[in-house]
Amino acid sequence: MPASTAHFHTTRPQPERSTRDGDELSQPLEPADLRSFWDKLRPEPSTPLQPDLDIGDLRTLLSTIIHKKANGAVAMELHTQQCCTLYESLDNVRRTKFLHTLAHEFCAPKGKAREAATAYVDATKQSEDYAQTAHLARVLRDSLTPQYTELFDQINRLPNGFAFLVHMRADMLSHIRLVRDDTACRAMSDALMKKLETWIIGTLDLKRITWNSPACTIEKLGQYESVHAVKSWLDVKRRLGSSRRCFGFFHRSVPMEPLVFVWVALTDSISSNVQSILRDREPMENEHDAKCAIFYSINSQPGLSGVDLGNFLIKRVVRVLRADLPNISTFCTLSPLPKFRSWLEQWLTEGLTNPPANIVSTQAAKQLMDLVPEATTWTMALKHIMDSRGWTSDQPTLSAMEPVVLALGAHYLVNVKRSNCAFDPVANFHLRNGACLHRVNWRGNSSYNGLRQSLELMCNYNYVLDRIEHNNERYVRDGTIAVSGDDPYIARAMALNAKL
């Protein structure tokens, strides 16, 4: 969620439980209404927006905190609190000015770092006094440390300071997406990410989230869900119902707000379609009959982007499920391919007139070309269909598209790389965690977002428990992708990979 919606001093009221079951809350919302649905649950900021941000006063306040000019710990805490209150009172434009001032004027002083580096190099050449060399090394290290890290340290000491910094980093990331050449803000975001990683260690509690959890916690599930949008309170209730699980990591200073959470469906087989999970109104009556745990959505707060919490969460949840439900033997994901369509569109542009051989079978290529008589290659036919409207409602087109898209999806997951790793970020995440690529699923997500991102493809990653460490080692070492199951499209892509 954007940091602009997080309030440092306010506590959100918890909706009454009885209101969640009303007919008006069971009605699905249109995508355009989703944000307003959750925004209505939030109170207005308790601090009115300031008419303007005085940069001079801001510099003075930041300098007082960073250079520890306040007299005593209590005064320092009050100044830090004042800084947080000021930041929260600002709108997005003024917050950007705040962050710009912090990133550009309170980074590592170049002159001081240059002097410290020269002194250290001279000392190592001219003297064998190890005590002096160690001292100069500390001075050099301190001179290279951005000044704003002291502000982060002071904020983290405040009650709810950790949550404030997570939301502040979400603002930084939003600014970076708009102004990509702001390297100073990017460096500040990276520095704060490292701080958050350090502070998280040993402070996380795994909790199961249920319909009986605090309303403010359940509200966060809707706000932070980024894979399959939550459309109503009834939608949330269904995902937390029978044969369903939701687990989250909570920071001890923010016990009501999950930093990262995962949705799990308990099923009798490996799921191939996410709508069958999200819309299932008749889940398994007895959870002890389930054979599979399907992880179908993992989400973290935007400000924790780059902090690897999902890996630890999945492994902890697997241990909990094995203890609670020993009948479950398969732990598998139902995952999106978020970059597949954008990659495919670029790839088609480059290879329209001379498509590569062996990715798609001759028969599948011919069936696709038969639908578009003017196309001279199957890639031209594919691009024509992708650019047309309504093809997902035409059965002959769907039948011809299925083997082509499945083959391309498997090729994308197995053979398209960034350095030595899978190009797809979700694939890289699970393969690095030690999972096996299990199956690609045609029409796995028939929503608009599924069509826009991946031509409705989804895939399964299978966490085979006795292979996880070995798979992880091979993938990290040389990019080897472990496979389970007998998916013919993955087998074809693996055979092509062996020839490359």
Image: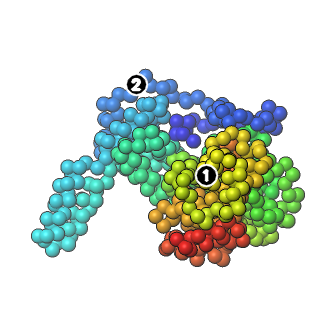
Q: Residue furthest top?
A: 51
Query: In the image, residue 44 lies at what x, y percent?
Result: 58, 28
Query: In the image, residue 148 lies at what x, y percent?
Result: 35, 46
Check residue 415 in the rendering and tell me which mark sits there, or answer none: none
Query: Is residue 403 or residue 25 the one in the foreground?
Result: 403
Q: Is residue 289 above or below residue 453?
A: below
Horizontally, residue 436 falls left or right of residue 113, namely: right
Q: Amino acid at mark 2?
A: Asp
User: How many neighbours does mark 2 have within 10 angstroms: few (below 14), some (14-19), or many (20 or more)?
Assistant: few
Query: Is residue 255 or residue 219 the one in the foreground?
Result: 219
Dot 2 corresponds to which residue? 52
Dot 1 corresponds to which residue? 376
Q: What is the C-alpha distance between the residues marked 1 and 2?
A: 62 Å
Query: In the image, residue 105 lies at what x, y percent?
Result: 30, 41
Res 149 seen here: yes
Q: Give the mark, 1 or 2, whose residue is nearer the N terminus.
A: 2
User: How many neighbours does mark 1 have within 10 angstroms: few (below 14), some (14-19), or many (20 or more)?
Assistant: few
Q: Amino acid at mark 1?
A: Thr
Q: Residue at x 61, y 54 (%)?
A: 377
Q: Residue at x 66, y 77 (%)?
A: 466
Q: Residue at x 55, y 29 (%)?
A: 46
